[in-house]
Image (cartoon, helix red, strand yellow):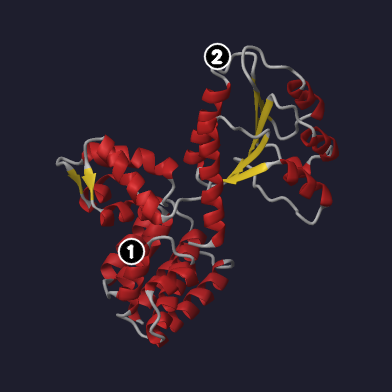
Amino acid sequence: MDSKKSKSDNGYLKLTSSIKSGDIDKFYIFYGEERYLLERALKSLRELLCPGGLDGFNYKRFDAKNLPVEELEDAVNTMPAFADKTFIEIHDFDIFKSSTKERFNELFSDLPDYVCIVINYNTIEYKPDNRQKINKEILSHATVIEFAQQEQSKLVKWIQRHFADAGKRISTGDAEYLAFITGGLMASLNGEIEKAAAFSKTDTVTRADIDAVITPVLDAVTYKLTEALVSNQNKKALEILTELFEMREAPHKIMSGLSIKIRQLFAARICIENNLSKSDLMDMCSIRHEFQARNLMITAGKSTLLGCKNAVLYCSETALELNSAPEPESRVTELVAKLALS
């Protein structure tokens, strides 16, 4: 696990511990792609700090790209009633781009003990410019929590627990596969688990059940396309490409996904040539799922270093030509045919 992921996990674990103990900080910044965990954290804070419900005197919510500092000051200066704290949620407000961030900084530097503020970055990107002194000062007052995608081992256990709640079992390998084809985010996995559990006719959910009811994300489909090409399953490769076109995926997105997978395959072949492991491949290509790295190593074993190198070059040439191609779908189809014959 890399240091960034470890730091993200530690921040989330500290937050859950703080919620359980009731030792809540005055000012939080929430961001990250794992919205399931983020929403759960917000729900827990609401339940803890607003026992009378969200329509009470102690809960304030702002949904605005432009938040007047005066409105937040009024909310902060309003004492809670029949509760210990006033809980203030601010959604999709980029504090670091505010024209009045100096005044916000003054407010955050001296918050009363009866306030808990959360700024939630959802549809806007969390990307403070740390070269600016004022941004560093704002961050110094905040507890910043990144809700990152969970590491594979934790995600697999979470998937298995949710299937168990539905009265079903799933193997570790099939749980890994489900995480991969859905993109591995809990927010989307939650609904897909319900679908697969409802479809399965036995007490164990299989890969066949998953494939029957769940539409894979583009990354997973391009991985299957690459695997089919290297395995000389040319008809299957063209069927997968046709499926992508029928899904209305843009040729440029397909091209991007295929190029990434071909480069990963090249990296896997390099690992084989240098007696490196699948763990080395995962670090090299930032691959989250162990089974994907394992399968890439197996697939790369069916090819040659020169073949993988040429495939990368073919993809690069096509990607460059795609911007001016009159029929981009045809150009991508030509590439897949060329890769099948190489």
Marks 1 & 2, CB-CB < 8 Å contact: no
Q: Residues within 10 Å of mark 1 (few under 14, many from 20)?
A: some
| Front: mark 1 or 2 | 2
Mark 2: which secondary structure? loop
Mark 1: which secondary structure? helix
**Which circle marks residue 52 in the picture?**
2
Residue type highlighted by circle 1: Phe
The answer to which image quadrant residue 123 occupies is top right
Residue 207 to residue 338: above or below: above
Sequence order check, earlier mark of 1 and 2: 2
**Residue 216, can we see it?**
no
The answer to which image quadrant residue 48 occupies is top right
Residue at position x 24%, y 36% in the image: 198
Q: Residues within 10 Å of mark 2 (few under 14, many from 20)?
A: some
Residue most extreme to the left: 202
Residue at position x 53%, y 44% in the image: 12
Identify which residue, 277 or 197, lies in the foreground: 277
Find disc 1 in the rendering and name its residue.
291
Residue 85 to residue 111: above or below: above
User: x, y percentage for residue 276?
Assistant: 40, 80
Residue type highlighted by circle 2: Gly
User: x, y percentage for residue 313?
Assistant: 49, 80
The answer to which image quadrant residue 99 occupies is top right
Give the Cα separation between the discs numbered 1 and 2: 47 Å
Identify which residue, 156 or 231, lies in the foreground: 156
Residue at position x 48%, y 69% in the image: 283
Residue 70 to residue 33: above or below: above
User: x, y percentage for residue 336?
Assistant: 39, 71
Q: Quadrant of the C terminus?
A: bottom left
